[in-house]
Amino acid sequence: MKNLLTRQKELGDLAALEEQKILSGKIIKASCLEYMDHIQTVMKEFTANHNKIMAKKSQEAEEYIAKNYFEHVMQTMENSIQNLRIQSTAEGVSAVSSMWQIESTPQTIQVAPPEAASGVERKYQRRAKMLKSTMDEIRRNALDSLEHYLLSNIIKNDFYMGDLMTGAYSIDECKAIQYEISKQLQIYGFHLRKWMSNNSEIIATIPVNNANEVIKIAEDETIKTLGIQWDPTKDMFGFNTNLSTQKLVTKRQALSDFARIFDPMGWLSPTTVIAKLFIQKLWLMKLNWDELLDENLTKEWQEFMQHIPEIKRIKIPRRFETKNNFKFELHGFADASEKAYAAVVYANVGSVITIVAGKTKVNPIKNKKTLPKLELCAAHLLAKLLQRIKTVINREMKIFAWSDSTITLPWINNCQSKDRFIRTRIEEIKLLVSNAKWQHVGTKDNPADVATRGVLANKLIEHDLWWKGPKWLREEEHHWPIKKIIQIDATYVTTSEELHFLDKVIFKYSSLSKLIRVVAYILRFVKRIRGKKCPEYLVKSEMKEAEEMLIRYQQKLQFKRKFRV
């Protein structure tokens, strides 16, 4: 532990306290300072930095720290992890690095506990603020150099928390990026370490000043990148599972198990939707957090979880080609069922189909919607997904959107509905993907249909429709089985019959006794306007008269023919 403290002090994570320290603009004695408990943690990763000091916060300490140390307005510069994954597919050569150290400059005054202490909130916010300041400074220098402008864009777009994931189309370009970004960030106190690339030539050119500069792994090993596994040798993404061995299932345990399945891109959507529906079922049953599930529910959840380790076998290529000399198309599919709705997007590059992203949502418990409206929600979800992917890839492309709903497609192509729900979503769809071509696809060829119904993990691995889309997608456009939707402008002729006033009263009340009293008051009102006297309060005879009137009226409705005779 002594060596650990010494190293942390050398790295600037700790600072010695003297008798007096400057804090929040005031000089106070060290005896007035509040201290946080600390524990030593061990990180079993591929780096030498196994040990770390983590701050243990009590509620009182957290309130004190928030009040005295960390009340700063933080600027965030966090990119979407989905955007980085999509963006990383464009480069032929990739390089990743984690930024674990922020070196302090001589002008920095540190007090214990420092703002960047592990276990204390806002560590990443502070890092994001510093990164943004660095990016702005480099961009100001970009007036004299295109190189600085490109570097500032990499800092802006390719960082997620403390991880950098970037690349280029050529090895030489990737080498230049690695060298320049390391050099520039080093000037501002950022030290990039733990480099890894899918090309050994790039790794060989990185100067190794210490054991943490480059990650060394065996051929069959993977590293964690943006929360998912990456095999640099094969340049494939994969999944890892760290499941609980707990046999007793509660709502808390089910949510904990589901949270261990990290799928930011929605590649496992047909499987994860089963868990989403199961958890929704638990909420409907209003179970307590630690209440044991009954035998049927436990069996259902265990059957789902026993196949989850199979997702380790799933491998997804990191890269798909985006150079302008290839035909590039995005194909999005949307579908809905009574339980959930989904969207999935594929890239078609030179007749090679690659899944890009997927997303599912369970149908809301409250304000349940009709199936046509759910199909529209699926189309809206697809439009948002396509817009995000189109923005990240940022090149000329054709966009095709597919749905198997013969009601939703006419709405999108020519919306004349007065329903605000429908009209609003149609307007948003057209705004998000104005250049998309919406077409009909059969249910059997719709991969989004798979995600609305759910597939266990062991069956998802070999599900070609989900991973590669329909087979005809690889063919030329004139071979696609496009079904034309005929829109019929129908004129509805209706006749209406004015409701009897008793019908309106009957429909309004569900309690018979209350209905009888209301009708009795109506009859009393009629008597009074005719000049007849009535008792001050309702009497039994008036209630009886109202009841008989309701009975006669219902008999007249039910036995019309007999009354006519």
Image (cartoon, rainbow, N blue to C red):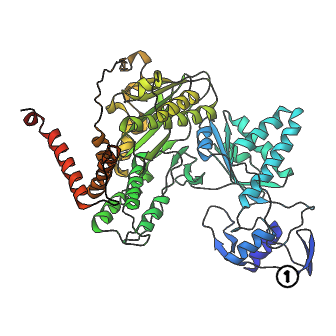
Question: Does any portion of residue 154 appear in the rendered image?
Answer: yes
Image quadrant occupied by the C terminus? top left
Among the 4 quarters of the image, the one containing residue 199:
top right
Residue 111, how many percent across, how many down?
A: 85, 71
Q: Measured along the vertical axis of the image, is residue 107 above or below residue 565? A: below
Among the 4 quarters of the image, the one containing residue 517:
bottom left
Residue 200, how many percent across, how many down?
A: 65, 45
Near-viewer residue (14 or 297): 297
Left or right of 399 in this view: 460: left
| Residue occupied by mark 1 | 32
User: Which residue is drawn at the image coordinates 69% and 70% (left, top)?
Assistant: 52
Give the tally of numbered discs: 1
Near-viewer residue (38 or 449): 449
Residue 471, how many percent across, how many down?
A: 37, 28
User: Which residue is drawn at the image coordinates 64% and 38% (left, top)?
Assistant: 93
Q: Measured along the vertical axis of the image, is residue 279 above or below residue 381? A: below
Near-viewer residue (103 or 36): 36
